[in-house]
Amino acid sequence: MEITGFRTLTTVLTWGRPVGDANGVLADGHTPVPIVLVDTDEGITGVGLGPHLDAETVFAAIEGEDPRGVTALYDRMLRRTFKAGHAGAVFGTIGTFDTALWDIKAKAAGEPLWRLLGARDRRVPAYASGLDIALTDDELVAVYRTYAEHGLRAAKLKGGLDVDRDRHRLALVRDVLADSGPASRPAMMLDANESWTRKQAVRHVCELERTIDLTWVEEPVRRWDAEGMAAVGRGIRASVATGENLTGLEQFRPLLTTGAVDVVQTSAVWGITHFLRVATLAHAHDLPVSPVGNTPAGLLHAAASLPNHLAAELQDLVPPAGVHLAHHVDDGAFVLGDTPGIGIHIDEHTIRTTHQRPPNQNGDGPNVRPSSAGRRLLAAPALPLHPVIDGHTDHPGGL
């Protein structure tokens, strides 16, 4: 079997409401989803969801190769792009191709990837994550009630700007999850998205912990600040989770060796081989791992095979346009299917004919760090709440 070519597409995930975090909000709730399809001479096509920046350069490392040698090809792609490929979007492109190669490998074997990787159980525990910082109280309750109807008993909220508002919102969601299921206490998490200094993080979380039992706090300070993460961890009761924006193992090593992280995360966009390697490193430190991403299908298969997987992030319950998933959500878990590969089918016709909104030109959204992040003396002003009307908002920005 040989790799013969690749194609790129971009579809859209429509949330039908504003989505964002402490850094910013996409008011219209439309997020782009780039896709790479890798073709072989035996008619098997692999699917990867993620960036395709410098795709031609990355593909040159694997063209004509047998896709089943996926871990060796992963390192080959890293070597081909070693000046830029250990961080950022190029590392994401490598991860996208890597996911597509794992998909081919499992399809060629006629097995779902979770089975090929040695998993025994197809169920992967999940927690709800609504990218919800701009929602009104009523919208917040409605969103998490839907998660609860799928059996979710753990939730991660976006916050970090106002401790009183965070306390109020966490209590609302906690009560929704508690009222919808067994008497056991829901697991509550808060994601600050690198918006605090070390002291701000400790003060904010300690105040919340007077009334809220937090399971973890995510990215309280900058992702690379190992000393800062460790200082926060010593000052609060909750665990510290981080890693979704870290790439090579060299970025994780300082956090683990200094005891700065309690829950090791990695994003679906960085690929399956990277996730398996990070999970092994975490396991050597007796730490759990947790995948992050809005369509983390590949990492779910890998997570099912790990001894130290904790829970995977469940964002939107509706997949991107033209993307069909073999797994479903039931009783608080992703339930993986029996379809060979990672269980993603791409409807190219639907994607190519779906109206694609132009990229956001206003500098709004969670990918733009505010100039005041980490330098706020008082609570930040409340984020504007934009009512959703017929699936759209009255805000002129966004994708």
Image (cartoon, grey):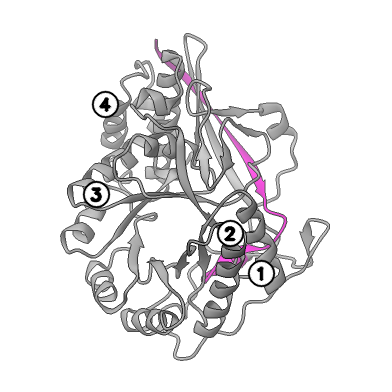
Task: Point out the stretch of residues depicted in magenta.
Answer: 1-25
Q: Which mark is residue 372?
A: none
Question: Where 269 falls versus 6 (above or below)?
Answer: below
Q: Are marks 2 and 1 in contact (CB under 8 Å)?
A: yes
Three-letter code for the amino acid on which mark 3 is drawn: Ala
User: Mark 2 sits on what residue?
Assistant: 130
Three-letter code for the amino acid on which mark 2 is drawn: Gly
Instruction: Specify few, some or many for label 3: CA neighbours under 10 Å numbering under 14, 14-19, or 20 or more.
Output: many
Mark 3 or 4: in front is: 3
Q: Are marks 1 and 4 in contact (CB under 8 Å)?
A: no
Magenta stretch holds residue 350: no
Kind of element beneath mark 2? loop
Residue 179: give x, y in percent of width and height: 61, 64
Q: Are marks 4 and 2 in contact (CB under 8 Å)?
A: no
Which residue is located at x 45 percent, y 77 percent? 373
Mark 4 or 2: in front is: 2
Kind of element beneath mark 4? helix
Q: CA distance from mark 3 to mark 1?
A: 35 Å
Which residue is located at x 52 percent, y 79 percent? 167
Mark 1 or 4: in front is: 1
First along the sequence among labels 4 and 2: 4
Closest to the observer: 256 or 377? 256
Residue 316: give x, y in percent of width and height: 61, 50
User: Mark 1 sits on what residue?
Assistant: 135
Three-letter code for the amino acid on which mark 4 is drawn: Ala
